[in-house]
Image (tube, helix red, strand yellow):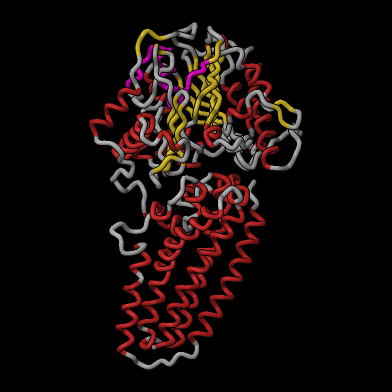
Amino acid sequence: MRERLRFMLIYFSFWTIYFLAARIIFLSYHIEDSKNLTLETVFGIFWHGFKMDLSMAGYLCIFPFLWVTFSNFINKSLFQNTIFSYTFILTMIITLIIVVDLEVYNIWSFRLDATPLAYLKTPKEAWASVKSSPVIPLLISFILLLIVASYIVYRIIANKIYDWKYIKNFPFLIYGLLMVAVLIIPIRGGFGIAPMNHSSVYFSKNNFANISALNSPWNFFSSLLHNSSNKVNPYTYLPKDDLDKTVENLYKSELPKKYVLNNPKPNVLIIIWESFTKKAVDQNHNNVEITPYFNKLKNEGIYFSNLYAMGDRTDKAITSILSGYPTQPTESIIKLPTKSASLPVLSRTFSENGFSTQFYYGGDTDFANIKSYLFSSNYEKIVDMNDFPDELVTSKWGVHDEFIFDKFLEDHKGSSQKPFFATLLTLSSHEPFETPRETKITGQNTVDLYLNSLNYSDESFGKFIEKAKTTDWWKNTLIIVVGDHGHKLPETGKRLDNFKIPMLWTGGAVKNNFVYEAISSQIDIPSSLLGQLKINAADFVWSKDLFKTNVKPWAFFVFNNGFGYVKPNKEILFDNVGKQLMLHSELEKTSDLMEGKALQQKSYQDFLNR
C-alpha cells in the first residue's frame, strides 16, 4: 500500500516539476521580454502559475491514479505496459505543445490555443506560414526535452512499480479512490467557488507576465473545450440598455457627405495586400525605399493615413473588408459557413446593382474556408492557383503577385457592357517571404526578408497600375488598395502600431487628391464605398461612412482574447481574460473604455446570434 501511495505522489510531482521547467524555458526563450521584468514580477509568475501547473498535473494524474487503485486486480504485465505507454504518449504530446508554444508567442503574441489547428486542414499553407520560424532548433529542442522527460519517466515508472507486490488489498481501494478524489482540489485551483481559469493566474499590469504564468498545455486544451458552440457571451460588460445606447452613439453622423468620385457608377477593384503595415510606408531599409510605388501613388488619390485593421489574420480581414464585419477575438466567422453566409457582402450588393463580380487570389481558396464564403457571396468568377500552369506555382502559397496582377489585366482587356466589381488578394508578402526576382533589400534575418517581400509586392503593384492606366477602363475605375492586416515587424515597441495599415483610393474615377487623417477602420470600407455610389448600405450595420459630415473618428480591433480601441488622444488595449487594461491604466473608469467594452460585447453577441 505504501509504495503505491508514494508512487502517486512522485507521479504528480513529476508533472508539476516538468511544468515548472517549461515556464523557465518559456521565459528564457523570450529573454528580451523577460529581462524587463522585476524580480518581484518573476516571482509572481511562478507563484501564480504554480496553481495552474497543479491543475494540469491533476488532470493528467486521474487515469494513472485510478489504474494504480485497481492495480492489485489487474494483470501485472498489462498494468505496467499500460501506465508506461500512457505516460510516454502523454509526455510526447505535452512536450510538443510546450515547444510549439514557444514560437507561437513570437508570431502572434499569444500563447498556443486551438487557433492554429484550423490551418492544419491545408498543410501546405500551414507549413508556408511557419517556414520562417526556427523549425530545426525547435525540433531539436522537442527531441531533447522528450529524451530527458522519457528517461525520468522510465526511472519513475520502471523502478517504482516492477517490484510491487500484487496481492488483493481491499483497504487500498479506499485510499486510492480518496487520492483520486483529492485531485479535484488542484484541478479546480483550490477550495474557492470559481474553478481554475485564466484569470486565476493573472496578477500584473504587465501582460507578458500574465501570459507567462499560464500553463501552455492547460491553455491549449481549455481552448479546445470552449468554442463557439457556447451561446453564452463571455464578454458581457454592460446591461442591454446601456450597451445599445453606447454603440448607437458611436455611429451618429450627419449629412451632407463629401463626394470624391467623378462618376456615380465606376468599376471597383479592391486590392487586399498581404501583411501591408503602415510602418513600411515612406520608410527605407538597408538604404532601399521599401514601397516606392505606393509612396508615389498615394499622392495621386485619397490616402487614409490613420487606418486600423480589425484583426491579425487574412481570414479575419476578408470579412472585415468585404462585409464590414467586426472580427472575433478567438474565432473567425469565415470558418463557420452557416454564420458567414448570413453576412452582407459587397460582391452581392454590387451584383444586385448590375455589376459583374470577380475574385482573384494566387493561392488556394480552400485555405481557411475562404471558398465557401466566396461562393455564398455571388462572385461570378473565382480565380486561384488552380487556374495557372504548374510552372508559375513557385511560391509556397501558390502564384506570386506579378502573375495574379497580369491575370487580372488579361481578363479585363477591352471594354465591357457591365461595370465590374473585383477583389484581388496578394500573397507574396506572407511568410516565408519568398520573391521570384533578385533581392533588392539584402539580408537574411526575418525583418530583411519581410521588407524585401513588401518591396517586391510594391513593384508588382506599381507595374500593374502603369499598365492599367493604358486600358479603356482606367478612367472609369476606382482602385482601393488596403492591407489585410499589419505586422509586428519592424518592431516599434508599441503594439498598436502592429494594427495600423495603409489604404489608398486611386484610379481614373477619383477626382480629388488629399489625405484622410481621421482615425478609421477596415470595417468602414463598405459604407464609405457604397455611399459614394449612392447604393443603400443599410445592411452593413457595423460600417461607418467616412465621408459623412461629423462622422466620429474611432477604430476598434481585436487580438487573441483582447481588444483595442482608438480615438483621438486615446489608446486602449484591454485583456478580456484578466479583465484589465494593458495600456494606460488611468483610463480604467472612463467612458472611452466603456465604449470599447460595448463594441466587444455587442459585436460578439451578433456573432453568436448568427
Tell me where residue 502 appears, x and y as whole percent.
Answer: 56, 25
| Figure quadrant of residue 575 | top left
Taking depth in this image into account, of 604 and 396 the one nearest to the observer is 604
Query: In the image, which residues are magenta?
Result: 516-538
Assign the C terminus to one quadrant of the image: top left
Tell me where residue 160 appears, x and y as whole percent.
Answer: 50, 85
Tell me where residue 564 appears, x and y as whole percent.
Answer: 45, 34
Q: Is residue 51 magenta?
A: no
Assign the N terminus to one quadrant of the image: bottom left
* x 45%, y 22%: residue: 525
| Figure quadrant of residue 372 | top left
Residue positioned most to the left = 241
Q: Compared with residue 359, is residue 532 higher up or lower down, i.e. above or below?
A: above
Taking depth in this image into account, of 437 and 182 the one nearest to the observer is 182
Q: Is residue 476 visible?
A: yes
Q: Compared with residue 111, is residue 249 higher up or lower down, i.e. above or below?
A: above
Tell me where residue 155 appears, x and y as whole percent.
Answer: 56, 80
* x 41%, y 72%: residue: 61
